[in-house]
Image: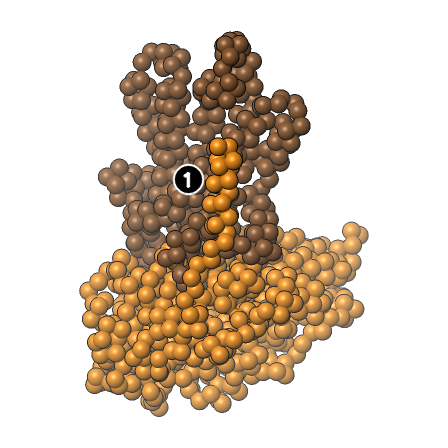
Chain colours: A brown, B orange
Amino acid sequence: MLRLVISRAIQSAGLLILVSIVTFALLRVAPGDPAALLYGPNASPKDLAQVRERWGLDDPIAVQYLRWLGNASMGDLGRSYSDGRPVSLAIAERVPATLLLTGAAAVISTVLGIGAGLLAARSPYGRMDRIVSTAATLLYSTPPFWLGLLLVMLFSVHLGWLPSGGLRDPLAPDGWMDLPRHLLLPAVTLALRDAGRLAAVSRASILETMGEDFIRTAVAKGLPPSLVLTRHVLRSSLLPVLTVLGMSTPGLLGGAVVVETLFGWPGMGRLAIEAALQRNYPVIMGEVLVVASLAVLGSLLADISCALADPRVRRQKGA
Amino acid sequence: MKLIRVALPLLLALSLLACAPQQPARSTSVVYGTTFQPNTLNPITAPDIVSRSMIEMIFDGLVSADDRLQIRGELATDWTVSPDGKEWTFHLRKGVKWHDGRDFTADDVKFTYDTVIDPNTKPTVAKSDYADLRQVDVVDPYTVRFYLSKPNAAFLSRLVLGIAPKHLLEGQDLATASFNYQPVGTGPFILESWSRGEKVVLRANPTYFGGKPHIDQLTWKIVPDSSMLAIQALNGEVDGAPIYSPADVAAVRSSGKMTLYESLEGNTQISLQLKNPIFQDVRVRRALAYGIDVPTLIDKVMMGAAVPATSDILPGSWAYNPNVATYPYNPAKAKALLAEAGWVQGSDGILTKDGRRFSISLMTDAGHKAREQVMMAVQQYWADLGIEVKVGVQERNSFVMQRVLKGDFDAVLLQSSVQIDPDLSRRFHTNSIQNGQNFLNYSNREVDRLLERALLTSDTEERKQSYYEVQRTMAEDLPQIPLFHPKTTYAFKPSLTGIKPSPVNIFWNAEEWAWK
């Protein structure tokens, strides 16, 4: 077990460095000058040259990268080009909103997805199964932007039940119901796609497990169906589901960009878009590092929980 | 058991929907929706227009511009200019206090402008805008004198720059000072809080010299998607917002729930690269103008949300000349002019002259659907004349830096930004060619002379005469083909009064807004 963790940690560090190099190179290659973007076409070339020099943009690329890497490894992600504040602060203040959103979406998609998969697996190829499977496929292939707009049109514009965007009501942010009401639509929008995928995967996994001999034994023993389900079927069929959950962590962080923009949710996805449009290199690098780290961590956690859930995996890795 | 397991979550969910938050009295606060957010709130360094529009509420300048782009005193009560036009003396308002209670004096003015023109302090707003300012002197605590290197009447319009407090910024590193997000100004509003990506909240300054604003709180709610912004305006979730797409404008208008205000934006025009021999014959340029049906573009592409343009100077401005040559749509005349210039139809239907085909590129920057549609329409109009037009769209930043400012284009569809002062030297004077700002390579000695003359005097009537001539001449010359001024539409709740959108900044008189 320990060896698994250590070897994966080393792999992860290497992966993060690779990601940072590729991102850095791409940023420098992409057209667009951050100074000109910020100061507009009316600024004189002399003004812009001064700003570029201050940001160290005229140094050789390798020097710029090593400077960034050196600082980043000591925890200093630099300062944002747009307002001069530390990048770590700019990112940190957006993290809670994103985690709230993706956390809520993860819970919703897990509950919905596994629940739907269960429903479908109960009567394979029956009516319920067909309904759930079709719905799952539809949801999985629907672009989140369109889905989000649809939900807003229905629940916000026509029914007037929920606000259409933002983190809180700008005038009354302290009502305890305020945040959940604003969270509901974006979280559901974000969750539905993954719920669809989880439903399909868990249905398949459950069906496969249910065909196993040990399940037939349990039923023959006289165990009530609900117990068969919870004690035996679910635990054994969890493996692929956990893998999908782990795989979808970076997706939740990345997919949040579209949902956050649509709903005006002040999270990391929005920060990434704003920084990209402004060529705010330090912020982009900082975000990529943070998101990549989280993705790697998510993947690692998924592997660990698989190892915990399934002794076979543990034994395989020789821990 | 099972019933409870199902019913409980359902009840919880329903309660979420049922409970609306307690609303405080709306009569004293305004929520304005916007897709942009400021970068910094420091007037000396703010580079972009969004930051500056918020800064104008927190800070005051020596002067300010109203909705007709006319200059009035703000922190300055009056001013005099020396006969040679190089010394400007400003008398400052007494009794003005900074938001932290300290007194505003001439020292703050000198500090602000010294910092801007000092080549060693960076970053600041474009120093090139203040290139003519040599020195600023404090004559007494409420009098300040500016020394220019040459007379420049347009300089007055540069003095809308917000004045920053010396006692808080002296010696600070402007790029990283906490002042940038905890500003202290003299303006009608004070920054209360700033949740990045979410909202910026301003509260009224009770001791503002112009009188306390009628609204106690002004909140900028940041809604990055423009269609969502329109939805929030219709829903009443914001009290006011700009409405961007013509379809959304039509929807808001037909709902009848909001009052619509309009202001004009800059000139949407086609700039021609005059180094290209094809464009050097004025008959060709006029033919290109005759070949575009502007009223149809305004009607079909802009859905009526634009007015025809004759130059970069807006119809509401004091310097606008309503009587200049125009080029109403006339393809027959266009073809005749082209033929006169020696262009004949080639075997492939494209005009040729001396073995050279009339084939050009027309580009614009990405992200503006209406502009892209205009570009496609112009391609079609010019194709009808026998001109081959290759269109292209490029991401804004690289487009401006690598194509426009380097002059690397045939024709580009641009939108000029609104300037407070009608001085057109930056774009059209011969001297601006070498620093890239006159990227059309336009050089007309008569226009140069008129532009220079208009800067020598502060007398508005005299300047107006010069600018009238400039507009007349350029309408004949057509270095750029002006198309229209798009209208920006703002939607506000009908009971909010006092709004008078200026082309430069809708918040210029926010202290006068009030709920009925």
Residue A115 image offset from top left, x and y in percent? 52, 30
The subunit letter for the residue under badge 1 reads A
Q: Position of residue A80 (x, y in %)?
A: 33, 51
The answer to which of A271 and B175 lies nearer the viewer is: A271
What residue would you read off at disc 1? A103
Q: Secondary structure at mark 1?
A: helix
Q: Residue at x 61, y 62 (%)?
A: B248
Residues B494 and B450: in front is B494
The quarter of the picture where residue B166 lies is bottom left
In which image quadrant can residue A123 be found? top right
Tell me what residue is drawn at x 31 percent, y 25 percent: A10
Residue B239 seen in render: yes
Q: Which residue is painted at 51% across and 12% down in the image?
A: A222
**Residue at the image point whose x is 23% and y is 39% from the top:** A74
Judged left or right of residue B86, residue A32 is right
| Vertical side of B63 occupied by A76: above or below | above
Q: Position of residue B69 (x, y in %)?
A: 48, 79
Q: Which is more toward the observer, A243 or A291?
A: A243
Amino acid marked by disc 1: Gly
